[in-house]
Amino acid sequence: MAHCNTVLNQMLTIIYRHEFEALAKTHHAGRKFRKFNRWSQFVAMVSAQLTSRVSLRDLVFNLSAQAKKLYHQGVKPTNRSTLARVNDEKPYTLYEALFAKLLGRCRTMSPKHKFRFKNKLYSLDATVIDLCLSVFPWATFRKTKGAIKLHIGLDHSGYLPTFVSITEGNVHEVSWAKTLQLPRGSFIVFDKGFVDYAWFGSLIPKGIFFVTRLKTNARYKVVERRKTNKHNGTTSDQIIQLTGVKREHCPFPLRRIRYRDKETGKAYVFLTNAMYLSAKTVANIYGSSR
């Protein structure tokens, strides 16, 4: 009889059990387990994500139906109250440490990004996850709505999540981005939600390059016009200087590139401090993050 691995089993094989148990021992709080353990909790929550369970009760019913298969994964039987208690009481730091272990392993196997330059390239983004305000009163977002915000920085070498943070829903993306310790010479790409000229002014002296889209209400003057190659979609390439109050925040010259996508016909206006790259490469950097 042919042997077929489940998707869950294939995912769990990348996690070394001895490493997990060492981390579980390090990041333990409270009384000792008698029957349940952190491995069983971990497998249960991974299964919940894979199978889109809507509640702990739904998850426990599903685990019970798969009990024979989960037995071979070293998963102990559980009930809803036990799983809820462990989720509430045990420290989340175990999973932070496990994430760091997996990330380090993936980095050794991941391919480099597709561009010729060797600098690190990161995409920054954030997404809002709605929560019930009456159940999660700490998740402040709006008067009648609760939410958390997931902030992520992806390394384009393998598109691995390198910077991850969860905050209250009303924390702005830029507030999180300003806390990142980015390596000198790295590129970061992000959408208009991250545009903050004072932040740009702090990145440039640190040798960090950025690519984003210029806001329509931005005030600037053109100080230099560069040649463009309209055959590759570039319609404008200018060196600009911000004017008004924004110049005080970012007194450095920036680059404004207008690009039209041949496939969709949509026009984009990019803003960057990368002066030595071709305009097409700047457009491709932004496109690689979408």
Image: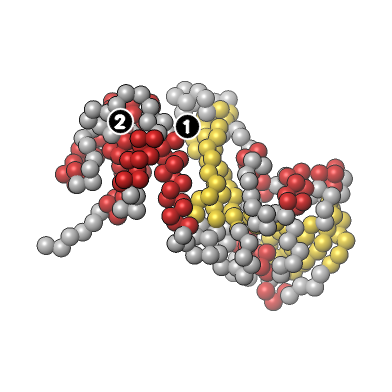
The amino acid on which the numbered mark 1 sits, given as a three-letter code, is Leu
**Type of amino acid at the residue the image marks with label 2:** Leu
Mark-to-mark CA distance, 1 and 2: 20 Å
Q: Is residue 6 visible?
A: yes
Residue 189 located left or right of residue 46: right
Counting from the top left corner in percent of width and height, residue 65 is at: 19, 41
Mark 1 residue element: strand
User: Percent x, y for residue 12?
Assistant: 31, 50
- Quadrant placement of the N terminus: bottom left
Q: Earlier in the sequence, mark 1 or mark 2?
A: 2
Q: State the residue position of label 1.
A: 131
* The C terminus, quarter of image: bottom right
Q: Which of the 4 image quarters holds residue 151? A: top right
Residue that mark 2 sits on: 83
Which residue does the image show at 22% across and 43% down from the upper left?
74
- Residue placed farthest to the left in the image? 1
- Between label 1 and label 2, give the one nearer the viewer: 2
